[in-house]
Image: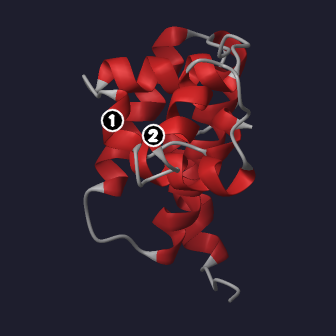
């Protein structure tokens, strides 16, 4: 569905906030504050468009400034499990049998696309972290 926005109102918002490519941590923080203020209220279609633009700018800055380390899927799984104080037994039945979970956790078996999808939902992350 195509969003209809009032170009004049949107132009006024752009003139007021003057979004641009984020180059510093201070600019990133300011963009985050603005995005959060927009996110937590009823928005006009023009504010929705501004919020979408801010999110793109913030994500680009953060992906460039704070790249994720290139770790394997199993290491990512172990990290997320540790962060949640989760034991491998808690994955039994979620991604497979006790043996399958053990093989995945110990790096003897790769995580399938279906398992990655389930893990992404479980940990609220992109399934691509596990592939």
Measured as percent of width and height from the top left, residue 29 is found at 42, 21
Q: Is residue 36 left or right of residue 94?
A: left
Secondary structure at numbered mark 2: helix
From the top left corner, tell me how far across and down residue 93 is, in percent. 41, 54
Which one is nearer the viewer's eye here, 131 or 87? 87
- Residue drawn at 51 percent across, 10 percent down: 25
Q: Is residue 108 left or right of residue 102?
A: right
Q: How many callouts does the rendering have?
A: 2
Q: Residue at x 66, y 35 (%)?
A: 130
Residue 31: x and y in percent read 47, 32
Quarter of the figure with the C terminus: top right
**What number is the disc on residue 21?**
none
Q: Residue at x 61, y 79 (%)?
A: 5
Residue pointed to by mark 1:
89
How far is the residue under mark 1 from the one under mark 2? 7 Å
Colouring scheme applied when the structure was drawn: secondary structure
Residue at position x 50%, y 76% in the image = 45
In the image, 26 versus 18, the foreground residue is 26
**Residue 120 drawn above or below residue 59:** below
Q: Which residue is more in the foreground, 9 or 92?
A: 92
The one of 61 and 73 positioned closer to us in this rendering:
73
Residue named by callout 2: 98
Q: Residue furthest front?
A: 99
Q: Quadrant of residue 98?
A: top left
* Disc 1 packing (10 Å; few <14; some 14–19; many ≥20): few
Where 83 falls versus 3 (above or below)?
Answer: above
Work out which quarter of the rendered image holds the N terminus and state it.
bottom right
User: CB atoms at circles 1 and 2 under 8 Å apart?
Assistant: yes
């Amino acid at each position: 569905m195509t969003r209809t926005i009032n170009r004049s109102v949107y132009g006024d918002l752009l003139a007021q906030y003057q979004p641009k490519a984020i180059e510093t941590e201070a600019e990133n923080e300011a963009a985050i504050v603005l995005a959060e203020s927009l996110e937590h209220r009823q928005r006009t279609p023009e504010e929705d468009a501004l919020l979408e633009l801010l999110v793109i700018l913030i994500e680009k800055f953060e992906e460039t400034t704070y790249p994720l380390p290139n770790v394997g899927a199993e290491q990512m799984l172990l990290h997320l499990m540790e962060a949640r104080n989760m034991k491998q037994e808690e994955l039994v039945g979620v991604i497979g049998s006790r043996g399958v979970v053990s093989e995945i956790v110990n790096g003897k078996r790769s995580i399938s696309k279906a398992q990655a999808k389930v893990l992404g939902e479980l940990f609220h992350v992109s399934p691509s972290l596990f592939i």
